[in-house]
Image (cartoon, helix red, strand yellow):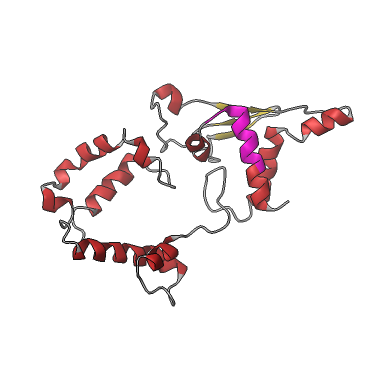
């Protein structure tokens, strides 16, 4: 089975079993102790860097149970139902991706993983000889040039902020989930602090 199909099948089974949001499913981790395999179920927990929509301690520390389904099928019908066993699907998925998995997220990305090169191309950058690993820097330089040409203020410092304001900026950013949840990467308060610090000066 192609890894893309296996990913979709496993993600679908996890989604209908748990009724969790997309962001929560993306935040499932295989790191110990966030993945625990039991004889008749799997226990999953969210990566602690993930901030759920309702950021209570209960929601952040919740255990997500994936039970076995028709674990010991005794007839053809039960065998068919067993093919929907989410516990076994997750275990098969982990085994299939173990040799080349690069991070601790339960689900891996497949297909094109870097769109920065195309984005830079469409904003006018010459990317004919660019390497994929340089695409992010090329896009950043292109956007920085746009801001400079448009005479946009040179970072947060130019509009009155300093590094002393970073804790308050982070605190104000955390509730803005309509924006932060668009990020393809999980981020912590420390990540946001570094982002604001790097944004003090742009040029």
Of 203 and 165, the residue lying toward us: 203
Left or right: residue 23 versus residue 149 is right
The residue depicted at 38 percent of the width and 62 percent of the height is: 136
Quadrant for the C terminus, please.
bottom left
Residue 21: x, y in percent? 50, 32
Of 188 and 137, the residue lying toward us: 137
Q: How many marks?
A: 0
* Span of residues in magenta: 9-20
Is residue 12 inside the magenta stretch? yes
Q: Residue furthest top?
A: 58
Residue 141: x, y in percent? 30, 66
Residue 5 visible? The answer is yes
The residue depicted at 55 percent of the width and 51 percent of the height is: 109
Is residue 9 depicted above or below 199 in this figure? above
Residue 73 visible? The answer is no
Left or right: residue 194 versus residue 42 is left
Residue 202: x, y in percent? 21, 59
Q: Residue furthest bottom?
A: 129
Is residue 89 inside the magenta stretch? no
Of 36 and 177, the residue lying toward us: 177
Is residue 44 depicted above or below 161 in this figure? above
Left or right: residue 188 versus residue 45 is left
Left or right: residue 55 versus residue 160 is right
Q: Residue furthest right?
A: 75
Magenta residues, dominant SS class: helix
Residue 33: x, y in percent? 53, 34
């Amino acid at each position: 089975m192609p890894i893309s199909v296996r990913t979709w099948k496993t993600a679908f089974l996890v989604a209908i079993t748990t009724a969790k949001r997309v962001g929560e499913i993306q935040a499932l981790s295989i790191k110990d102790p966030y993945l625990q395999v039991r004889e008749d179920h799997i226990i999953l927990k969210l990566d602690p860097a993930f901030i759920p929509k309702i950021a209570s301690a209960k929601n952040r520390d919740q255990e997500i149970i994936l039970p076995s389904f028709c674990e010991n099928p005794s007839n053809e019908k039960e065998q068919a139902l067993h093919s929907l066993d989410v516990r076994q699907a997750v275990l098969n998925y982990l085994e299939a991706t173990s040799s080349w998995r690069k991070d601790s997220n339960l689900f891996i990305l497949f297909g094109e993983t870097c769109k920065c090169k195309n984005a830079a191309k469409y904003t006018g950058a010459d990317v004919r000889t660019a390497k994929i690993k340089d695409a992010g820097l090329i896009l950043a330089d292109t956007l920085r040039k746009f801001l400079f040409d448009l005479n946009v203020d040179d970072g947060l410092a130019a509009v009155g902020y300093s590094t002393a304001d970073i804790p308050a900026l982070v605190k104000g950013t955390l509730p803005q989930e309509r924006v932060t949840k668009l990020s393809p990467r999980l981020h912590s308060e420390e990540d946001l602090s570094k982002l604001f610090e790097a944004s003090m000066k742009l040029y």
